[in-house]
Amino acid sequence: MVVPEEERRARATLCAIAEPGEILLGRIVARAGPCRALAVVRGEEPPPEGISITEGGRRRLAAWRARLQAADTEADLAVCAELGIRLVCPGDPEWPVTLDDLGDRRPYALWLRGPLDLRYSCLRSVAIVGARAASPYGVRIASELGAELADAGWTVVSGGALGIDAAAHRGTLAADGQTIAVFANGLDRFYPAGNEALFVEMLHKGLLVSESPPGTDPHRLRFLVRNRVIAALTRGTVVVEAAARSGALNTAVHARDLGRALMAVPGPVDSKVSVGCHKLLRDTPPARCVTTAAEVLEEVGRIGADLAPPPRGPVLPRDMLDPVTRSVLEALPARGAAGPAQIAVRAGVDLATATSRLGQLSAAGFIERAPGGWRLRRSAKLPSSPV
């Protein structure tokens, strides 16, 4: 499907005059299309049938009409052409259909900067979000998760913020993986400035995404609203660290509302930046506790295929013994010695079997002869093959 140029420019204008995620405007666009939506804003057409405009709605329409006077879509598109920014609209091949799950809060369009294909990259993607004031523990975990998910062929999506977001992006890039940052401002400037080197690298290897045209400044509301896009683009969201009040928890709410997998990494019980994660793990329904990339993939991957291996302790020499031989070994007293008949009774085997297995255990270095029978060796050697 080819989006008509008139519709593309109309959507670019809507991005400039309204805040992202405006439900009223989203409803008008969904029912009338972007071109007629602009006519409604100008006052040239009535709202589509079935949409009633409240007093608050009339104030919004007035605000959008005022901003329309200052909007310069041609200038925005010229800046985009100069910086290599492209506009992707619903109906374009690069548009991720998962964004349609947002309903009336779906983006009017998206501005993209970087070589990755947004739709293709998000087919297998995970969001990693968390605190800006992250602890060394959180930074390490986010970086490791990003690298391991990249090694498994998954795209990592985050918000480009300091702390956990930046660590996830850097870990993914270090593993030569694909990563996407969703901005709350225009793509003609990098925010925060402390991550400028990271964003420059992403211009060559990743993708920067925004709902806002060039020249748009970030503010708190836009950060919160963009979190719904992070959640909608991905199959699941991992919260690595989050304080009691954290934007990462806002992303978690969107993920849960959208039916996406929600995961949280536990932290030290006395860590303020893990309070939010622990709350998610106690909520109803609770977030899934994850500690490794394998556990993350078990939540978002293919059913029955991307299963995390069960946790296992170290393999001990006695784990290599067959059940009967192990029962004979476990029948020996922890201290002192015992005769073959006594060991046979304790192991529940006949005397001949006990005598045979005691010889094998002795040869393998588990036990040794002692006055009165057999006893455990204090330093049993590791057998080279099962007894």
Image: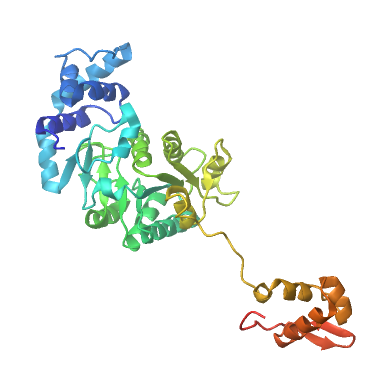
Q: Position of residue 271 (x, y in %)?
A: 56, 49
Taking depth in this image into account, of 109 and 78 the one nearest to the observer is 109
Query: In the figure, 301 relative to 99: above or below?
Result: below
Number of numbered discs visible in the structure rendering: 0
Residue 60, quarter of the rendered image: top left
Q: Position of residue 253 (x, y in %)?
A: 45, 35
Residue 107, quarter of the rendered image: top left
Q: Is residue 66 visible?
A: no
Q: Position of residue 268 (x, y in %)?
A: 58, 52
Q: Is residue 92 visible?
A: yes
Query: In the figure, 174 relative to 133: above or below?
Result: below
Q: Residue at the spot x=77%, y=76% of the render?
A: 329
Query: In the figure, 384 relative to 310: above or below?
Result: below
Q: Residue at the spot x=26%, y=23% of the render?
A: 25
Taking depth in this image into account, of 357 and 237 the one nearest to the observer is 357
Query: In the figure, 163 relative to 222: above or below?
Result: below
Which quadrant holds the N terminus?
Answer: top left
